Image (tube, grey):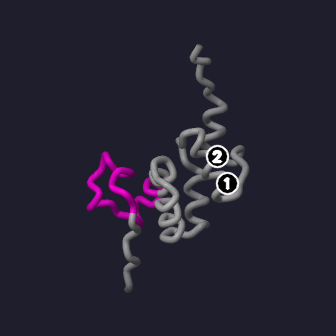
Amino acid sequence: MEEKPKPIFEKRIFWDVNFENIDYDAKANFVIERVFERGDVQDIRNCRRYYGDDKVREALLNAMFLPEHRIHLASAVIDRPITDFRCYTLRQLNPTLFPY
């Protein structure tokens, strides 16, 4: 069986794990979430090429956490409203105190 070539991502995205030992297929949700959380446009393009739009959409909609500005980016990329994202609804259920 032919293996897909590994996607090319910046090492800074995976600063807390051993970059050479990442299993891109078994840990697909982790990789997709991390790329959308910390990656740039080229990393997101490589992620979509490797996993396909359906897998990326599923992983992002079920993600437990994404920063708010990245939720808006993911919403634009997969063309879904932010209210469909699990991390957005979890954030709405647990509001933080106003910082001032």
Q: Are marks 2 and 1 in contact (CB under 8 Å)?
A: yes
Q: Considering depth in this image, is 79 or 94 the residue closer to the camera?
A: 79
Q: What residue is disc 1 on?
A: 76
> In the structure shown, which secondary structural element does the residue marked by tag 1 occupy?
helix
Outermost residue, bottom side? 1
- Of the 4 image quadrants, the one containing the N terminus is bottom left
- Left or right: where 79 falls relative to 91: right
From this view, report whether residue 93 is shown above or below residue 47.
above
Q: Quadrant of residue 96?
A: top right
Q: Which residues are magenta?
A: 9-31
Q: Amino acid at mark 1?
A: Ala
Give percent across and percent down for residue 39.
46, 53
The structure residue drawn at horizontal position 52% and vertical position 71%, both measured from the top left corner, is: 49
Q: Amino acid at mark 2?
A: His
> In the structure shown, which secondary structural element does the residue marked by tag 2 occupy?
helix
From this view, report whether residue 69 is shown above or below residue 54.
above
Which labelled disc corresponds to residue 8?
A: none
Q: What residue is disc 2 on?
A: 72
Say if the magenta span includes residue 50.
Answer: no
Q: CA distance from mark 2 to mark 1?
A: 6 Å
How many labels sit on residues?
Answer: 2
The structure residue drawn at horizontal position 37% and vertical position 71%, both measured from the top left corner, is: 6
The structure residue drawn at horizontal position 31% and vertical position 46%, both measured from the top left corner, is: 16
- Left or right: where 63 falls relative to 93: left
